[in-house]
Amino acid sequence: MERSPRKASAGQARRNGSAAGPGARERLREAATRLFAVHGYSNVSIDQICAEAEVSKGAFYYHFDSKDAALYGIYQPLLELQMQRLREILARPAPLADKLRAVAEDVARICLERIDDLTVFMQSMHLLEPKTRALVGEQRREYHQLFAQMIEAAQAERIVRSDVPPDLLINQLFGPLHYSTIWYRRHGPWKPEVLARQMTDMWLGGVRVHAAAAEPGGKA
């Protein structure tokens, strides 16, 4: 484990002013994301992150207490953005079916637009310190619960299938999204918004209640 006199480093960074400069924290986060995605969390040092971000080691410790904190700094914005967007869509005065599509398409687009963040998330979450991992787990559960409540309401309105549990319907969406870290490339031929719409269409095609089944006496 890397060790550094954190207070001294942070103090030095404050004195020279470089650590608090515009964009330093985001450059560190982006550098850590790129390096973790390519080489794996365990194979990247703080020195490498600083070199990639072109900042001093003192600047690193100004913004992050440890490499674990930098790893959480990759997860946190992604989780917060997903939760923010979910709440915004659920608050819309729109039919539930429209909200369901909007939520699915939105989270798919976010995952694809931030594929490096998602890749690091999938590869390295188990390497977080226990307390940090528990915090991430709590944030993920909060998102999952809101999503599940929307699915349950959609089942009650016979929008989606009720013969399978909500968790399975949710996994049918997120499974392919998580697997996209294997094959999707940001600079490839597929645009995130187009692919997100197509993936949402395929998901809804499998979970939606079809017209015949929605008739009274039909099977959901």
Image (cartoon, grey):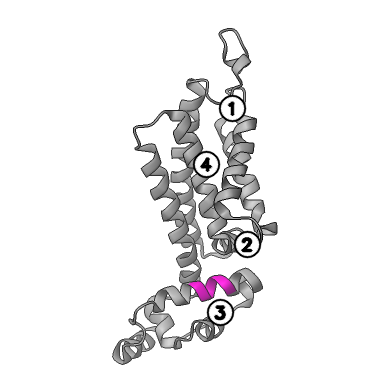
For the N terminus, the quadrant is bottom right
User: What's the amino acid at mark 4?
Assistant: Ala
Between the residue at mark 1 and the residue at mark 3, the CA separation in whole angstroms equals 49 Å
As drawn, is 151 to the left or to the right of 8?
right
Nearer mark to the viewer, of 2 and 3 = 2
Q: Name the image quarter holding residue 189.
A: bottom right
Q: Are marks 1 and 3 in contact (CB under 8 Å)?
A: no
Residue 150 image position (x, y, % from top left) = 46, 33
Residue 75 image position (x, y, % from top left) = 49, 61
The residue sitting at 49% across, 26% down in the picture is 154
Between the residue at mark 2 and the residue at mark 3, the CA separation in whole angstroms equals 19 Å
Instruction: Return the residue at label 2.
Output: 123
Nearer mark to the viewer, of 1 and 3 = 1
As drawn, the label of residue 104 is 4
Magenta segment includes 33: yes
User: What's the amino acid at mark 3?
Assistant: Met
Magenta segment includes 10: no
Point out the tag, 1 or 3, that comes first from the N-terminus: 3
Instruction: Return the residue at label 3.
Output: 1
- Say what secondary structure mark 1 lies in: loop
User: What's the amino acid at mark 1?
Assistant: Arg
As drawn, is 16 to the left or to the right of 124?
left
Secondary structure mostly seen in the magenta stretch: helix
Of the pair 180 and 64, the residue shown nearer to us: 180
- Say what secondary structure mark 2 lies in: helix
